[in-house]
Image (cartoon, helix red, strand yellow):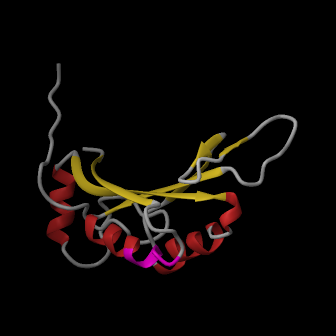
Amino acid sequence: MSKRKTADTGPVAGAGAGPGAKIGSETGSGADAMSDAAETSLVWATMVRVYLAESDHELKPLLKCLHDELRVCGVTVMRGVAGFGASGVVHSARLVDLSTDLPLVLEFFDRPDRARAAIERIKEFVEPGHVVSWSVNVELKP
């Protein structure tokens, strides 16, 4: 069995350089961070999840902010087949109707400092309690 290298310290080096930027890529300063990232298999990042509904009409402006202004590493938007929120009203997709109020989940990850800045910035797009975040390890190619 082969052993994998792991790192238990340090943020994601150079993450958030722009849309499509790769974790571990360098954006200008801190060449040492790049060499450190090249020697490790895991780096710390923050995963952010935002809960929306199709009827909120905030998805396009939120994506524009994350892409053009904040330049996070990447964003994935998932459309739920069913869900409910604080109101308790269940929204679901059925074959007989095409619901336009299905739940949406937007996710992205970046260096912890950049993710925290993004969370602060996107508060104007999202209701309180609809953003969650947690620390993750991102596996890099050795």
Quadrant in the picture for residue 31: bottom left
Extreme top residue here? 1
Residue 113's image quarter?
Answer: bottom left
Place of residue 61 in the rendered image (x, y in percent of width and height, measured from the top left)? 61, 75
Dominant SS type (magenta)? helix
Residue extending farthest right: 96
Q: Which residues are magenta?
A: 120-124
Q: Nearer the viewer, residue 114 or 97?
A: 97
Residue 123, located in which quarter of the rendered image? bottom left
Seen at 59% across and 53% down, the residue is: 87
Residue 60, horizontal then vertical, whole percent: 65, 70
Whether residue 120 is situated above or below residue 74 in the rendered picture: below
State the quadrant of the C terminus. top left
Q: At x 49% / y 68%, what residue is drawn? A: 19
Which sits in the foreground, 19 or 99?
99
Is the residue 101 above or below the residue 117 in the image? above
Q: Is residue 100 left or right of residue 113?
A: right
Task: Decide which of 54, 61 is in the foreground and name it.
Answer: 54
Horizontally, is 132 left or right of 20 in the view? left
Q: Is residue 3 above or below residue 75?
A: above
User: Where's the N terminus, which quadrant?
Assistant: top left
